[in-house]
Structure formats: C-alpha cells, structure tokens
Image (cartoon, helix red, strand yellow):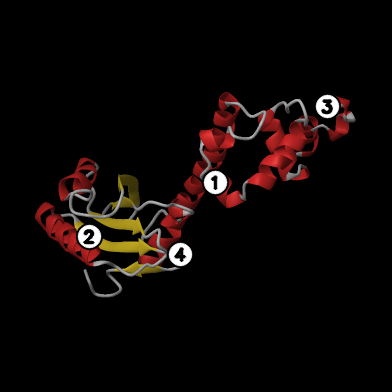
Amino acid sequence: MIKRIHDYDLDDRPREKLIKNGAESLSDAELLAILLGIGNKKKNAVELAREVLDTFSFEELSTISVEELSKIEGIKTAKSATIVAALNFGKRVNQKIINKKHDRITCADDIYELMKNYFVDSTKEHFYSIMLNTKNDIIAIEHISTGDLNTSIVNPREVFTPAVKRSAKSVAFVHNHPSGSSLPSKEDLLITRRLVEAGLILDIKVLDHIIIGRNSYYSFKRENKI
C-alpha cells in the first residue's frame, strides 16, 4: 500500500511547505508533485515526480511535449498539459527578465546575451528579428520563421513587415545552427546580403546578423560582412 501525501505529517506535505516556508524549501520532486496533484496506483505524487525526473533530464524537460510526458504511467493528457504549460511559462518569465536587462543594443555581445536562451536544445533553425528605435532601444523581438534557412523561408517582405509596422529605425537578425557550428553557410551569406539591400530601400538599417551555435556565435558586422 502506497503512502499517500495526506499520510505525511502536515509540515512535510509539499503544498503546505510551499505556503509556510517558500518554494526554496522544496526539492525539485516536491515542486513537481504540486503540479501533478496526485500520483498513480503505485506511487504518490512525490514518488511519481521522482520518476519523471529520473526519466527526463532538465534539458529534455525544457522542451518536452504533452505526448512525451503522457507516456509516464499515471500522467494523463490534461495533467501533462498543465506541467508543460508551467514549464514554458517559467521560461517566458525568465526571458522577459533577461530582455529587460538588455533593453538596448550596443554591440554583438548584447544581441548574443539577449537571444542565446531562445535556442536552448532547439533541433530546428529559428529566425528572429530584433526591432530598434533611433537610440537602439528594443521595440520588439519577433519570430519570423522556423526551418532550414533559405530564400523562401526568410523572405525580405515578411522580415521587414513587422519593422515597418512598428516604425523601427534599425533591425538586428538572429538565427541558430542546431548543428552547433556558428559559421555562416553560403545561404546565410546570400540571405544577409539580400536583407541588407532591402533595408537600404526601406531606410531601415541592418545593424547585424548573429548566428548562434553551441556556446559560440558569429557576427556578420564584426566580420565586416555588413
């Protein structure tokens, strides 16, 4: 017979510990157990949470899908959706804080520090546009496309439409290489050249294009490619 959470001493129950002592007093399993709510026929919520943490690394949990999490016995689709939503909300809160710390772009390092967490464990290429005003303050960050970079995926019209709508004076582009290499491909060079030319026509300066790899990045501006 499993020991239910209600069989724990009151001070040892995850939710009560959270309320009384704060989140820092709970283990990872206890925090996850609060989201789970209940366990299964064999394990209580804390034990089930430990199974999840033993099954998936933190890197895997950061990008886990509802379907993947639902493979754990006792975690149904609705509960999986709650956990995935909580994980992603936490990531967004963290990114918002990072964005506030880097609300002005002064160099390639600023762009890298601002955007590097957007691509953690990503298996696909993502292309972003950072829109700025005359003082290089960030107006908005927009996801433009997902997929291998090519001229059909990154179309100048689609790239600059958000910048025009927001009256941006300049833009910086960022995309990742899931392979880990930050060196530009021929396609990267071609697309960057086209985007710079389109920016000149629209009077929107392309400040830089950053390629983020694994623990490194490439700046077209720094390498005098812009």
Where's residue 119, x and y in %? Answer: 43, 53
Q: Element under label 3? A: loop
Return the disc, 2 or 3, that comes first in the chain's sequence. 3
- Write down the residue under mark 3: 4
Q: What is the spatial separation of the Cα atoms under label 2 and label 1, in whole angstroms? A: 32 Å
- Write down the residue under mark 4: 214
Amino acid on which the number 3 mark rests in the picture: Arg
Q: Element under label 4? A: loop
Amino acid on which the number 4 mark rests in the picture: Arg
Return the disc, 3 or 4, that comes first in the chain's sequence. 3
- Write down the residue under mark 2: 206
* Residue 62 badge: 1
Mark in front: 2 vs 3: 3
Disc 1 to disc 3: CB gap under 8 Å: no
Mark in front: 4 vs 2: 4
Q: Element under label 2? A: strand
